[in-house]
Image: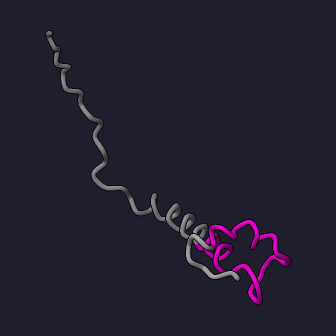
Amino acid sequence: MAQTVAPPTSTPALPAKLPIGAIAPWAVFFGVLMLVLLYFVGAEQGATSVVSGEAVHEWVHDGRHLLGFPCH
């Protein structure tokens, strides 16, 4: 059985450095987004509640247990 060898393909060159100005807005955006999600999963109940009622608690109940936050 004969096998043929494919010629090596060239990979596209990556930039040497990514400018921090291009990354910083996205890093801040995702950092704030993660903090908001962490708040709703971990602390959205009781005295610090932003949304009244138990709706948010019920939506994030399993995630709360998965991340180790007590809720009962």
Q: Nearer the viewer, residue 56 or 36?
A: 56
Question: Does the magenta run of residues contain 37?
Answer: yes
Which residues are drawn in magenta? Answer: 35-64
Image check: 42 left or right of 49?
left
Pick the front one: 63 or 31: 63
Q: Is residue 13 above or below residue 33?
A: above
Front residue (pair 47, 15): 47
Does the segment drawn in magenta span residue 66? no
| Residue 67 sits in quarter | bottom right
Q: Percent from the top left, x then y, of residue 8?
A: 19, 26
**If the image is split into quadrants, where does the N terminus sit?**
top left
Question: Chief secondary structure of the magenta span?
Answer: helix
User: Residue at horizontal 55%, vertical 64%?
Assistant: 30
Say which residue appears at 77% left-offset and 90% top-offset: 47
Residue 55 falls in image quadrant: bottom right
Question: x, y (%) of residue 17?
Answer: 31, 55
Residue at image coords 23%, 30%? 10
Residue furthest left as drawn: 2
Q: Which residue ends up furthest to the front in the rendered image?
A: 72
Residue 2: which quarter of the image?
A: top left
Residue 20 position in % (x across, y down): 40, 63
> Which residue is farthest right?
53
**Residue 32 point in image, percent of width and height:** 59, 70
- Count of numbered marks: 0
Image side of residue 48 versus residue 11, left or right: right
Residue name at image x 27 percent, y 51 percent: 16
Q: Is 31 or 64 nearer to us in this picture?
A: 64
